[in-house]
Image (cartoon, grey):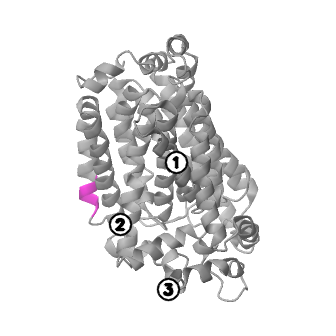
């Protein structure tokens, strides 16, 4: 059963959109039993990973996490964010689907961002202001510990790689050493602007990280899937991944990546008047993403998928120019990405990664996605292939030359994000802690729940919210 079309001008224009055919195909792909089986398979994967992790820890303690597969400690607790989190979840479950269908498009994107902010802040405050917010980015491993070493930014960048390896003079804290310098430079910039300290850093990460919801909505609509975007908005808001977005720098990284893909999609589909600016902006943000996290080079996979799905390479020259400008700036300042990455790999295996067993984490990493994306994402993902195969999708592509594949574009993009995630997993450079490291990919996945029958949306939203609340109240997460 499909969501009722809204009466906004945007939704009336979307009534003849290929998205309509895609949604019909998705709902006809099977019944509730298969949805429950898909979600159950994800839950089973997580349960097996948890049991196996406990056994390994008891045997040789090589996992280096207290509550595998999550980096967390068992600590049932309540906090000042408990009541606001419950209220936010109840409101989104009760009113989110109807509002998402009826609000104007602009109001929907802003309201979704605001609701995601409320949800994420509430979850962060379950652990209290000091431990759940201020303390997240001020531990000995975090970025703020290195801010005072950037009095002379060009000189520090030229010298950056000399401090990556353990044993080198004044080696960087773990997260600074493990990322290109744009990550720590962000917090240096906040400090120079008078917004230093853990509270401002956490606020920055939460505000930017939750904007990923709006970026995903913009991308889906540009791909011709407004109805899917509207139906998926409440699921994006209540994503269990919000537990780690507040307050973690990887949430900020996820936002940069999401807006890069959103701008690229707008430029490729021509759904913005500032098409050239969007293409250049996409390149600049893609370049920034690569200098925030080495793993975000995998954004090349969804970015190319956007161009393939829209059958155009028109944004490519300006996007490459923007990307080159960012790379050129860091090169001019003396930082060499490939040299630093080679040292990072050596630093990675100087730490606990050399003991963490690849044979466990290569599949247990995937179990963390069950928690971050939520069971509803697994249920919705099993319907996604139908949106590509549906005959209506093919007919729509013929009717709209130059935009071929847009009806199946969202499903292709989700598949590309999953492929990037799988590549990260197989690389062996993401053994544990993937609940935060993979946020740039997993924050998109709850949108697939839009493909579930509308009559089931509130129930699935309740499952998503319950997943987040249980994790945040039963465990003390490190990020």
Q: Judge depth for marks 2 and 1 and give the one in front.
A: 1
Q: Return the residue at label 1.
A: 280
Crowd band around label 3 with a 10 angstrom C-alpha radius: few (<14), some (14–19), many (20+): few
User: Where residue 148 is drawn, which disc sits there?
Assistant: 3
Residues 222 and 467: in front is 222
Of callouts 2 and 1, the N-terminal one: 2
Secondary structure beneath disc 3? helix
Q: Residue 84 placed where, x, y %?
A: 24, 56
Q: Residue at x 67, y 51 (%)?
A: 424
- Above or below: residue 395 compared with residue 347: above
| Cα gap from disc 3 to disc 2, whole angstroms | 20 Å
Q: Is residue 287 visible?
A: yes
Residue 184 position within the rendered picture, expressed as x and y whole percent measured from the top left: 53, 72
- From mark 2 to mark 1, how far is it between C-alphas? 28 Å
Quarter containing the N terminus: top left
Position of residue 300 in the picture relative to residue 473 (left or right): right
Is residue 174 in the magenta section? Answer: no
Q: Front-most of 455 and 116?
A: 116
**Mark 3 or 2, nearer chain start:** 3
In terms of secondary structure, where does tag 2 sit? helix
- Which callout, 3 or 2, points to the residue nearer the camera? 3
User: Quick one: 472 or 433, which is closer to the camera?
Assistant: 433
Label 1 and label 3: CA atoms lie apart by: 33 Å
Image coords of residue 195 (percent x, y): 35, 76
Q: Which residue is mark 2?
A: 203
Contact (CB < 8 A) between labels 1 and 3?
Answer: no
């Amino acid at each position: 059963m499909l969501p009722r079309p809204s009466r906004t001008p945007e939704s009336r224009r979307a009534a003849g959109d290929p998205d309509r055919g895609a949604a019909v195909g998705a709902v006809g792909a099977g019944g509730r039993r298969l949805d429950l089986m898909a979600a159950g398979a994800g839950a089973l994967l997580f349960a097996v990973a948890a049991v196996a992790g406990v056994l390994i820890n008891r045997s040789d303690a090589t996992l280096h996490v207290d509550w595998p597969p999550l980096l967390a400690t068992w600590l049932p607790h309540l906090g000042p964010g408990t009541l606001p989190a419950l209220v936010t979840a109840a409101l989104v479950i009760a009113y989110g689907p109807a509002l998402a269908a009826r609000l104007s498009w602009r109001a929907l994107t802003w309201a979704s961002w605001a609701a995601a902010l409320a949800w994420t802040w509430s979850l962060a405050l379950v652990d209290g202001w000091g431990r759940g917010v201020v303390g997240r980015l001020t531990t000995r491993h975090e970025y703020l510990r290195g801010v005072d070493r950037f009095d002379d930014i060009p000189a520090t960048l030229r010298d950056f790689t000399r401090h990556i390896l353990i044993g080198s003079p004044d080696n960087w804290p773990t997260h600074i050493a493990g990322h290109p310098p744009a990550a720590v430079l962000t917090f240096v910039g906040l400090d120079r602007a008078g917004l230093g300290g853990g509270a401002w850093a956490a606020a920055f990460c939460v505000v930017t990280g939750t904007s990923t919801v709006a970026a995903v909505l913009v991308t889906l609509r540009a791909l011709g899937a407004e109805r899917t975007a509207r139906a998926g908005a409440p699921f994006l808001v209540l994503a269990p991944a919000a537990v780690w977005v507040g307050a973690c720098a990887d949430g900020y990284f996820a936002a940069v990546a999401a807006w890069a893909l959103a701008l690229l999609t707008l430029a490729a589909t021509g759904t913005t008047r500032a098409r050239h600016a969007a293409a250049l902006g996409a390149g600049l943000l893609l370049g920034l993403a690569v200098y925030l996290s080495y793993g975000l080079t995998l954004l090349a996979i969804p970015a190319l998928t956007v161009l393939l799905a829209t059958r155009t390479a028109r944004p490519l020259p300006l996007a490459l120019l923007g990307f080159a400008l960012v790379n050129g700036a860091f090169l001019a300042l003396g930082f060499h990405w490939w040299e630093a990455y080679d040292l990072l790999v050596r630093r990675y295996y100087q730490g606990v990664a050399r003991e963490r067993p690849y044979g466990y984490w290569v599949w247990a990493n995937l179990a963390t996605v069950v928690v971050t994306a939520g069971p509803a994402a697994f249920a919705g993902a099993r319907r996604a292939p139908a949106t590509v195969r549906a005959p209506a999708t093919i007919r729509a592509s013929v009717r709209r030359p130059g935009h071929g594949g847009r009806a199946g574009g969202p499903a292709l993009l989700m598949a590309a994000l999953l492929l990037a995630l799988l590549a990260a997993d197989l690389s062996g450079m993401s053994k544990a802690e993937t609940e935060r490291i993979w946020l740039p990919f997993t924050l998109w996945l709850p949108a697939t729940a839009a493909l579930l029958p509308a009559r089931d949306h509130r129930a699935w939203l309740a499952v998503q919210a319950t997943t987040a609340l249980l994790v945040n109240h039963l465990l003390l997460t490190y990020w």
